[in-house]
Image: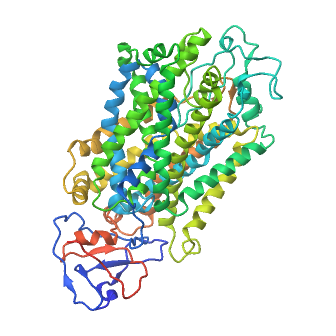
């Protein structure tokens, strides 16, 4: 019996633009060259019995897997542990009651962070697909995959600018004295001062991204309003060459273009061969920042005033627990720092072995992520305590978040230390590496989704992976050129505030939980996880997916909507109306993918509304699911990839 005789074509009831037709799987068989056909034994995992209407190719015979499981762990650590752990969590902790902030934070980890983190990894591992194709588990909601692809594309596009700025600072850190520590340079004005005790910076920063916060470059907050810190002038007049507004594009900074090109080249060669090569790179990019953090911590606590900074960081303020803003900040930080909703975790999980214990991985990664955030606070506030002591000001006047910490406060603190170039090099090298692994894992997640979507016989689908990666990197590089102009910071903040903001990520996480828990079925997915790892996770997981996490997501979502404010840069420049329109276009371009896709599929399907719903919410299985199908069952599958007639059709492990 030939492989083709095991299947018969069966058209669906829905009109679809896909050229591929469904196949109906007959009783499961294994077939080898020169051997007889035998019927496989039924599996205990009988949750994969429904039929579905396939739309795309789900062949998995050539899908890469991690060389070792530690590659997956390190990749997730590199992606989820990013700049936000270092420059956002410590600030939020000090601002929201010090050690008291850990109470709502830890609670949100277990009711929001871990459940969705686990859901995304398990979904990718179970479906063996990334991005859009993962949602074949409920085809009507494939818009979730499209939305995550849009978000991660925008995030990849502008997040790399933080690395570009870090590389630029790193290149200027090999001189003594440091260029931002003195006046008299061609970029300085007559108001430049190196007496840092006479200049401090506003600490009100608007959080808006998993790893990035909107920079604040306010003027002196003391009485000497006419003076400008040399660090501030280096940042605004040398690095950014800031223009007067979004409509003043200005010239392109040639040096920044070189830094941008170098960064994208590094990202390209980290991922061009897929997870086999990327899995090796993350060992360095994930471990190196921790080594530098330890070195900076040891050095920081030895500085005068460091202990005061650490005490200030952890000083408990129990009255904060009654404030809604504290709980909102905790929830928002969790969804940001765990990179929930970006789709990259699903892509990373799709390269796992089918029986990998992703449940255990989720808790290990959560411990690493949150532990890194907490430890980074000691590193940051030991240095800020030293800086406050040197300047004779309160720590609240030097506490910063986001790029304000990385490119203003910390460089200023480094310039006050002995061996300043050494600590500047270490800090910016850590910053570069810490952001780099998040960047190339995010790009890898996007590439995985693109590769899974491309029809095998199309022009792009027939191209080598290296070509697809090059096209994606070049596209992002082209868009990034708008951010290395004199008006580039305004473009950057526009992307930061809207495209991957709290609103978009919370909207995405809400629908992920609802679709899996209420459309596909929480108990059903728990059974699927049990098929992979050998046991059912704790019931609290399905309770979170079904009730707690969606309520938290929607609560924080509406809080952001109700408290929406017009985008303002530097507390002075208000974005024009057309800038806000562009920003909302960036936000809605991902959010509308979900409802628009649902309406499109329902309208293009035949039958009653109930029949359409039933048909479009029936999963589409890949061939790796066949071993869980009872032999008497028939299931609609996607067409197999073209293969040599001498190769094994299916290889059951039952």
Is residue 422 or residue 233 the one in the foreground? 422
Left or right of 358 on screen, residue 97:
right
Compared to residue 139, the image places residue 538 above or below, namely above
- x then y, percent, for residue 78: 46, 46
Q: From this viewpoint, is residue 561 visible?
A: no
Is residue 213 or residue 5 the one in the foreground? 213
At 25% from the left edge and 46% from the top edge, which residue is drawn?
Answer: 542
Left or right of 533 on screen, residue 450:
right
At 45% from the left edge and 66% from the top edge, which residue is drawn?
Answer: 604
Q: From this viewpoint, is residue 206 visible?
A: yes
- x then y, percent, for residue 491: 67, 40
Is residue 598 or residue 240 the one in the foreground? 240
Quadrant assignment, res 229: top right
Q: Quadrant of the N terminus?
A: bottom left
- x then y, percent, for residue 245: 74, 33
Left or right of 486 on screen, residue 325:
left
- x then y, percent, for residue 260: 68, 47
Display coloring: rainbow
């Amino acid at each position: 019996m030939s492989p083709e005789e095991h299947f018969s074509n069966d058209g669906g009831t829905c009109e679809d633009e896909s050229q591929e037709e469904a196949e109906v799987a007959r009783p499961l068989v294994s077939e080898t060259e020169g051997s007889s056909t035998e019927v496989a034994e039924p599996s205990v995992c009988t949750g994969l019995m429904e039929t579905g209407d396939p739309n795309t190719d789900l062949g998995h015979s050539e899908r890469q897997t991690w060389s070792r499981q530690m590659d997956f762990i390190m990749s997730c650590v590199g992606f989820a542990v990013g700049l936000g752990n270092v420059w956002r969590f410590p600030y939020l902790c000090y601002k929201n009651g010090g050690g008291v902030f850990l109470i709502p934070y830890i609670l949100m980890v277990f009711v929001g962070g871990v459940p969705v983190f686990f859901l995304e990894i398990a979904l990718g591992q179970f479906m063996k697909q990334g991005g859009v194709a993962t949602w074949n588990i409920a085809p009507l909601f494939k818009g979730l995959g499209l939305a995550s692809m849009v978000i991660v594309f925008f995030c990849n596009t502008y997040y790399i600018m933080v690395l570009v700025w870090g590389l630029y600072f790193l290149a200027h850190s090999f001189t003594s004295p440091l260029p931002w520590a003195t006046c008299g340079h061609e970029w300085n004005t007559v108001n430049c001062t190196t007496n840092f005790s006479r200049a401090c910076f506003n600490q009100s920063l608007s959080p808006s991204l998993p790893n990035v916060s909107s920079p604040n470059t306010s003027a002196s907050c003391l009485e000497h309003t006419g003076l400008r810190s040399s660090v501030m002038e280096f940042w605004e007049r040398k690095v950014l060459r800031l223009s007067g507004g979004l409509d003043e594009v200005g010239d392109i900074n040639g040096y920044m273009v070189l830094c941008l090109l170098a960064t994208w080249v590094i990202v390209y060669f980290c991922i061009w061969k897929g997870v086999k090569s990327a899995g090796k790179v993350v060992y360095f990019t994930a471990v190196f920042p921790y080594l530098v953090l330890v070195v900076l911590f040891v050095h920081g606590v030895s500085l005068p005033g460091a202990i005061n900074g650490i005490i200030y960081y952890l000083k408990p303020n129990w009255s904060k627990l009654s404030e809604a803003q504290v709980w909102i900040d905790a929830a928002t930080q969790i969804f940001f720092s765990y990179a929930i909703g970006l789709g990259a975790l699903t892509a990373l999980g799709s390269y796992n072995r089918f029986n990998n214990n992703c449940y255990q991985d989720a808790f290990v990664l959560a411990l690493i992520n949150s532990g890194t955030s907490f430890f980074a606070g000691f590193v940051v506030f030991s240095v800020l305590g030293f800086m406050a002591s040197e300047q004779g000001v309160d720590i609240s006047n030097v506490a910063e978040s986001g790029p304000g910490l990385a490119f203003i406060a910390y460089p200023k603190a480094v310039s006050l230390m002995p061996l300043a170039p050494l600590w500047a090099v270490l800090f910016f090298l850590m910053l570069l590496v810490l952001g780099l692994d998040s960047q190339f894992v995010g790009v890898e997640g996007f590439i995985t989704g693109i590769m899974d979507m491309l029809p095998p016989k199309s022009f792009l689908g027939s191209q080598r992976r290296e070509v697809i990666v090059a096209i994606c990197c070049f596209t992002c590089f082209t868009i990034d050129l708008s951010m290395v102009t004199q008006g580039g910071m305004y473009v950057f903040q526009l992307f930061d505030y809207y495209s991957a903001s709290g609103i978009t990520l919370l909207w995405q996480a809400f629908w992920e939980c609802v679709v899996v828990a209420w459309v596909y079925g929480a108990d059903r997915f728990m059974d699927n996880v049990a098929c992979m790892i050998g046991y059912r996770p704790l019931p609290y997981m399905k309770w979170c997916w079904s009730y707690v996490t969606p309520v938290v997501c929607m609560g924080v979502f509406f809080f952001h909507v109700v408290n929406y404010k017009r985008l303002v840069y530097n507390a002075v420049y208000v974005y024009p109306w057309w800038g806000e329109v562009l920003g909302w276009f960036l936000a809605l371009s991902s959010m509308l993918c979900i409802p628009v896709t649902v309406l499109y599929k329902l309208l293009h399907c035949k039958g009653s509304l109930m029949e359409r719903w039933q048909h479009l919410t029936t999963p589409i299985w890949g061939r790796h699911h066949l071993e869980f199908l009872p032999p008497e069952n028939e299931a609609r599958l996607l067409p197999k990839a073209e293969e040599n007639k001498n190769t094994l059709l299916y290889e059951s492990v039952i």
